[in-house]
Image (tube, rainbow, N blue to C red):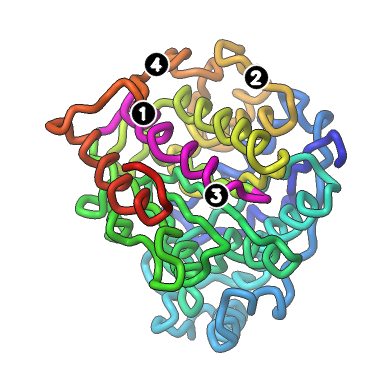
Amino acid sequence: MSGRAQLMWDEAVTGYDFGPGHPMDPVRLALTRRLIDAFGLDREVEVVAAKPAGESTLRLVHREDYIRAVKAASLDPGAADGSYGIGTLDDPAFAGMHDVSALIAGMSVEAAEAVWRGEAAHAVNFAGGLHHAMPGAAAGFCVYNDASLAIARLLELGAERVAYVDVDVHHGDGVQAAFWEDPRVLTISLHEHPRTLFPQTGWPEETGAASAEGSAVNVALPAGTGDAGWLRAFHAVVPELIADFRPQVLVTQHGADTHFEDPLAHLAVSLDAQRAVQVACHSLAHEYADGRWVALGGGGYAVVDVVPRSWTHLVGIAAGREIAPETVIPESWRQEVFARTRQLGPLRMTDGRWPVGFAGWEAGYDPGDRLDQAVLAARRAVFPLRGLLA
């Protein structure tokens, strides 16, 4: 295995642009890439420009008629077929949509291939993590489901156990749906409760098809959950399941929209807690998956203050050069932020909450606490199906 991590990047991904006023502003990708450069992390990783996913690869997850519809809308956005979820308010059609979506998918697939073959220690595609796309429809700002495609490619290459951990504020519904009947894939999603947030799925009772009972895990967190509760929930569920499943590859999705500044959701998590989960995922990959780790981006709509810092931390962790939370952000990057957005960039790589403390589950729980109720619901739904104590 190479000692270096791979960073998947092509400037063309900033063409994934639903238009002015859409929350999925591609400036978040450009600013993340510039912040990675500003810290010199590009010298610590192998930067790889992958090929777009071809149609045969896309068909590992997506229906042929849907791919045709995306291609057609890409050529003529005004004629997009809304029955496929494109040309909607969430997913407006735009020229070149197929090409850039296939590029992002190809980046995640190539990341998975590199990790599986031992060509990279870890691989990061922060432009990826588009976890809402379904086999036959776009949804939630996602056209092609690169996370599902990466996992499907790993299975095609011979992987027998792949674990997917999704800490985006929204349920990882597209990935769960893609592998609902496949016991080779364990999907774990921690997200805001479906009562209060799109896509209104991800209930703890969603545990997989009869052929794969216990392969889908959902921790539905109450709105307002902050750092201590979020980390408590993660550590009360994820490590024990990963230890039991012992994946050959760990694929993680790190949507930054759990943050308290995010405009589209209602959790209250800090950048420091996001960093702590990134560190935990890295450790789990080494402990249980021989270090094979594919890390993806995802949601995140505080495009200046949060997303670039969160994903730059992720790249630093994958590269083996963690950025200390108290580190001052280079002035050159802050100047670029102002030039691009007319906003003032953050000063440090922290929200001032490091180190983040939380109470471990092993110390007991409070059945009257809403956060503990969410954890209990997930454990009671899945753990017995996997032969574990709830």
Q: Secondary structure at mark 2?
A: loop
Over which residues does the magenta segment extend?
A: 225-249
Q: Is residue 118 above or below residue 385?
A: above
Q: CA distance from mark 2 to mark 1?
A: 23 Å
Q: Which residue is mark 4?
A: 357
Residue at x 37%, y 56% (from the top left corner): 385
Q: CA distance from mark 2 to mark 3?
A: 31 Å
Q: CA distance from mark 4 to mark 3?
A: 27 Å
Q: Secondary structure at mark 4?
A: loop
Among numbered discs 2 and 4, the one appearing first in the sequence:
2
Residue at x 18%, y 35% (from the top left corner): 370
Q: Which residue is mark 3?
A: 245
Question: Is residue 185 visible from the viewing direction of this image?
Answer: yes
Image spot of residue 67 (x, y percent): 59, 81
Residue at x 66%, y 18% (from the top left corner): 330
Among numbered discs 3 and 1, the one appearing first in the sequence:
1
Image spot of residue 283 (x, y percent): 62, 30
Image spot of residue 321 (x, y percent): 73, 22
Quarter of the image for the C terminus: give it.
Answer: top left
Q: Which residue is mark 2?
A: 323
Among numbered discs 2 and 1, the one appearing first in the sequence:
1
- Density class for disc 2 (Cα within 10 Å; few <14, some 14-19, many ≥20) is some
Task: Characterize the magenta stretch by its predominant secondary structure.
Answer: helix
Image spot of residue 168 (x, y percent): 44, 45
Q: Are marks 2 and 3 in contact (CB under 8 Å)?
A: no
Tag shown at residue 232: 1
Q: Amino acid at mark 1?
A: Arg
Q: Amino acid at mark 2?
A: Ile
- Density class for disc 1 (Cα within 10 Å; few <14, some 14-19, many ≥20) is some
Q: Nearer the viewer, residue 132 or 165?
A: 165
